Image: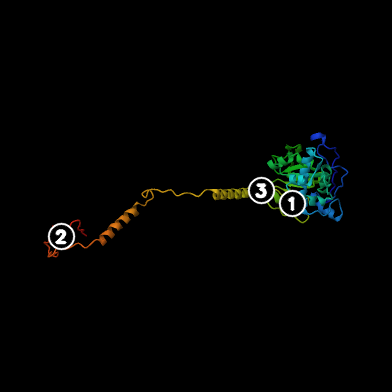
Amino acid sequence: MSRRRSPASSTAAATSGSGGRGRPTPEKAAPKVAGPGRAATAVRGAANGAGPGRGIPDATVARLPVYLRALYALADRGVATVSSEELAAAAGVNSAKLRKDLSHLGSYGTRGVGYDVDYLVYQVSRELGLTQDWPVLIVGAGNLGRALANYGGFATRGFRIAALVDADPAMVGTVIARHTVRGAAEMESVIERFDVAIGVIATPAAVAQSVCDRLVAAGVTSILNFAPVVLSVPAGVDVRKVDLSIELQILAFHAQRRGAAARESDAAEAPPRRLESVPGSDAGLDVAAQLGARLDVAAGLAAAEPIPVSAGADYSDPGYRAGDSDYPAGAQAVGT
């Protein structure tokens, strides 16, 4: 299915920001890239000569929106030029990687001066296909769909919310962000009417695949999926997945690792514990001490000299009775 793309309207730079400079807007006269609604296609397809792209690597394409966001922030502050080090710091990359990425756009900056912010905004926007209009259809008008429809940042980046559809009869006919929610049965006609380039799936996981199939069948080849499920699509269809729960789990993993490392560090820095002396009875040693004492007594008895036996005493006589002569002074008889 062929699609026409309505050109982005030509607007002057906004008057916000210091010095009346404002945020630069890609000009209407900027080169446009024909084809399905995919920013990546605008870049990769240009490698065959259609458009301004130069066969930019996918990793670079993924970083271009980050650079553009940093450039918009600089423009809002009225910054005219920026060095590669400053822009790299704002984008969270190293300066060598940034310079290499921007070299794919044909932008090398000026030694000792840096990059012109306005022109670099135009260059990055052109490569991402943001110099034209990208109509977006949101499928699912629940809490997430509402939030996406009300987000004002899409329009400033060239993405226009064209319509919302939902399968819930209670939602159909309600107004969200100046859009009347349409029934799910109208999806194909809405795509045709508004020339939808990008479909956003904000539905429960159970119906996400069927929604995706309908979008693809209607000619939508760029899909942003918020449902927690992996979609199956044919070749030539681009799907980007956003799963907030996965991102939170990854953050939890790193937080746990940091916590474990901190505990190990605290344990390594703690002073060694000193053993305090305690009474033997408190430590449960009194039984052993008593046993040792008894062993000492037994050893003393074993080492004592034999007790002399009275001469003529007949110990086998049942009528025998021990007399004083049988016990030398200090000796005691032990009966068993």
**Residue type pointed to by label 3:** Glu
Which residue appears at 60% of the width and 50% of the height? 257
Q: Name the quarter where the C terminus is drawn.
A: bottom left
- In terms of secondary structure, where does tag 1 sit? strand
Q: Of the residues shown, which amino acid type is indicated by label 1?
A: Val
User: CA separation, marks 2 and 1?
Assistant: 112 Å
Coordinates of residue 35 in the picture (x, y in percent) = 84, 51
Q: Nearer the viewer, mark 2 or mark 3?
A: 2
Tell me which residue sits at (78%, 40%) in the image. 74
Say which residue appears at 69% left-offset and 49% top-offset.
207
Between 38 and 321, the residue placed more toward the observer is 321
| Residue that numbered label 3 is attached to | 247
Q: Quick one: label 2 or label 1, which is nearer the N terminus?
A: 1
Q: Residue furthest left?
A: 319
Report the disc number at residue 239: 1
Disc with the residue nearer the chain's start (2 vs 3): 3
- The residue under the point 69% across, 42% down is 144
Residue 270: x %, y % from top left: 53, 48
Q: Amino acid at mark 2?
A: Asp
